[in-house]
Image (cartoon, coloured by chain):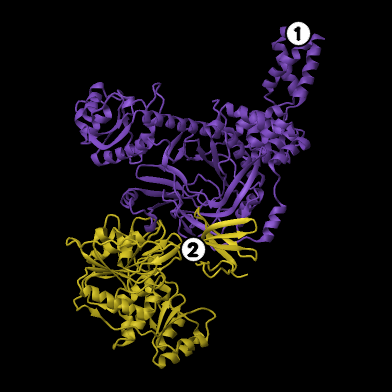
Chain colours: A purple, B yellow
Amino acid sequence: MGRDYDELGLKVGLEIHQQLDTKKLFCDCNSELVEEEGLEVIRDLRPTESELGEVDEAALMEAQKELKFRYQAPESSSCLVELDEEPPQGPDEEALDLALTMALYTESDIVDEIAFMRKIVIDGSNTTGFQRTALIATDGTLEVDGKQIGIPTMCLEEDAARSIEEKKDEKVYRLDRLGIPLVEIATDPDMTSPEEAKEVAQNIGGLFRGTRKVKRGIGSIREDLNVSVEEGARVEMKGVQELDMIPEYVEKEVERQLDLLDIKETLESREAEVDDKIYDVTESFEKCESGIIRSNLDAGKGVYAAKLTGFDGQLRGEEGEALLGPELAEYAKKTGVEGIFHSDELPKYGIEEEEIGSVEKELGLHEKDAFALVTAREKKAEEALRKVIERAKMSLEGVPEETRQARPDGTTVFMRPLAGEARMYPETDIPPKYVDEKKLEKLKDQLPERPGKKIERFQQEYGLNEQQSEQLFKKGYDVLFEDCLKRCSDPSVVANTFLHTFPDLQKEGYDTEKIKKEELFDVLQRYDSGGFAKEGIPELLKEIIDGKSVGEAVKSVGLESVDEEDIREVIIEVIEDRIDFVEEREMGAIGPLMGVVMEDLKGKADGEKVSKVLREEIQKRIG
Amino acid sequence: MVRDLPKNIEDGDRIRIEKGDKSYEGILMPHHRFSREDIITLKLDNGYNIGIEAEDDIKVKLLEKKKEKPGRSKKKVGKDEEKPDISILGTGGTIASYVEYRTGAVHPAEDADDVLYSNPEIAERCNPEVDIVFSKLSEDLKPEDWVTIADRVLEKLEGGAEGVVISHGTDTMGYTAAALSFLLEGFSSPVVLVGSQRSSDRPSSDAHLNLLGAIEVAKSGNPGVFVVMHDSISDEICAIHRGTKVRKMHTSRRDAFESVNEDPVGEVNPKTGEVEFEKEFEPVEKDLGRRGSIVDDVALLYSNPGIDKEDIRRAGEKKGIVIVGTGLGHIRTDLVPEIKKLIKRGIPIIMTSQCLFGTINMNVYSAGRELLEVGVVPGKDMLPETAMVKLMWALSLEEDTEDVMMKDIAGEITDRRTR
């Protein structure tokens, strides 16, 4: 985008949550996600008394009444502990050791005694209504590209239940994910560019992988980003799953904050203001043809409006770009309405000039003014418009501090105002855990290699070039790469599989995540023992992604024992078919024909062998 | 070194701890029972607690004395003539407790307002009159407490309450339910015991649903002593159990309470208020009152292969014995002479079964017949605990103990079982 992020005063902080590959944190369950749905349990959650502010008590209670939670409890991956039917055990020693290892890695101050806390979460993602979490260490640092990044806190906590479905009055969760240990690393807002944020995330991811006891694959590492620009505000973006997209999220958030700052300036110059009054404009729509308004009116609902003096053109840009419009709508939606209509997008949706004119008259609007409409029952519409008014007023101040949900396309959507201090109280079911100095010494001796060292070692030990080594690390294949080398003696083939074959397959639409570690090992081992040529690997992996076992895949691709005679047969055929070309080009035909032969053989044979036989056969023909 | 802080520092104060080159600021928390002696627990500003070892080089500085927490606003609810008057008696347990977030301390409900504050919906369902009888963990309750509770129930019913709800710790709720079933007489209103398996300081507590369910049952007009608890581990339906047939059958599940040797007598949907009884309970045509008392001198003797004469003799120091026998109602035959001696001395001995499900039948095997011959009273399909409570009560009556024990008084004995 070519922004000067230094000048904008960009600050990015990360919060990284990594799932550990151990037993669950507070019971003896395997930490595996499963297809099984298992027993279904229906629960309510009630905010407990002192957790409620006096003010919004009524509203919260009302909201809670409507909502119930349905939990799927697969027996293979959850027990009474996840169901909140039995007190927790633990914490799991291995998980604790991993958290301590990460703390040692980042030279953090490890606490002397670990106390698990209950952090109140009542969206249903925890059956208990709280997440168990403990602060393990404070005040660490991590060096990335010569810069010290502060690590103020490191926590060990339980993952939440997996969301399966969200309906209006019911949320469905599966308990397989609940209780999987997570290490949460928070950084200071020390990163000053979108790319740097990604670099640091990659680095921390690499540290985790180095322990060899973390989960891999989508959803196993999740990032929250804290982004602010000067004059803007701290905005937290939750649930970024793809590391590569970090820069995009940061860039888009910077744009959003800059837009909001521009809007603020415009509004200031226009002396814009927001009227607290909510207007009933149902009469203006008596003859309206719009489908949604028509059916709402027929159902006895009304149309209500908020007056936004001086807001014209600030809800949506002249080229249709989204400005304040979506922000207002996202706030309104929190009250349960489908959305809003606003004057910058009208006439549209069957709302014609006539109705617009009538609303403008009713509200007493002038040229630079705008309005927002909600169609619903009076009480509901009023609630929604209160939110619109609240958000519109914030725009006079600039950027509100918010927590936003990351969407897969790189945009974010409003979740809630930035939470203050979390409601936490001690988890009395788990005794405090003293951290033994001897244990720390032992862990210190076993600390895995640092990323920089590893990249260097890959070059020396395996003859990779710097770029290959770095790419393996950045793409998260470094650990797997070395595991593969235990089965396959050719580093460059293994590196190529990760750095070329995988991206090629992904481009063709194959999901390489589906390849299990053991399957990959098996393929490479078979290659290594001469079962087929390296050219066969991509075809084989495709079949495996499509669901075949390695054995089946080998058969189906026909990679079984292609001997020289078979190769010769194919080659003779290829030469016959292109005899004119061969006679014309003579030995010069070897190059072009290699590709054709290899394709026909689908990688069944080794390239060198094919080249040798091809040479022989052409020699014979032109003899 | 034991946690040793300057005299002017107490729990709740804001302090700074300097230890080597590390420095921590936060609120001093009470020492955890399972923490090491030399650990100082600090609540940091981010909400987390951490433990810091008090070593010699540590410096502790008081930053700010603790703030007195503001009192909670109390709610006053007006009486609604349309709604029934329901008495709620608190006896302890976690059903009506609340948590103080700063320290994590769970406080039991101390007065009526505490209960209503945590459960404001109660006032939508009835005119609640809340009394805290006492605040005890149910494992600390003694038989004499059952009498105290019974008298309070009578007082409330005589005072015009349409039903009584008793909040109770779950460990011994079955015992109290049985005791009230025998002690109360001539009442024509529901007396409902209710507890919770997840304390009410948690958002996922079962206390709220159980309490609303209990209130609905208390409003139902169906006379009897009941226990109302979750019917399954879902927050949907609560089962209504007969006070003499109910037993806690799981250490931790929400649906830990089960009716033994009969189906629950009904169910309630606490959200809709629907109450459904399998059968109607007849109001008893007697004056409301307490019958008898409790003689706290009965042994519950668990039969097992290692039991010996000494065990029997020791149990014989009490005024009565309930044997929790094996199978159909047995105990090692070489102990029969010892048992015979006690019966001759006038000590009633009742036989029940550790199988819990099914009835005693001492005619099938000679071991049983021998016991019958020496005068052991078959407790039929009574739960051992119910039999024990009943014997404590029967001993207070003028009537023949054996007759009382063999007669069904409050649904504790059923002659027909279908499962």
Between B383 and B168, the one nearer to me in the picture: B168
Q: Is residue A227 left or right of residue A346?
A: right
Mark toward the viewer: 2 or 1: 2
Residue at which label 2 appears? B13
Q: Quadrant of the N terminus of chain B?
A: bottom right
Q: Quadrant of the C terminus of chain B?
A: bottom left
Q: Is residue A143 above or below residue B294?
A: above
Q: Residues within 10 Å of mark 2 (few under 14, many from 20)?
A: some
Is any atom of residue B379 visible in this view? no
Between A592 and B404, the one nearer to me in the picture: A592
Residue closest to the far bottom:
B345
**Parent chain of label 1:** A
Location of residue B168 in the rendering, given as x and y in whole percent from the top left corner: 36, 69
Mark 2 residue type: Asp
- Helix, strand or loop status at disc 2: loop
Q: In which image quadrant can residue B153 be found?
A: bottom left
Please tell me the numbered disc located at residue A585. Answer: 1
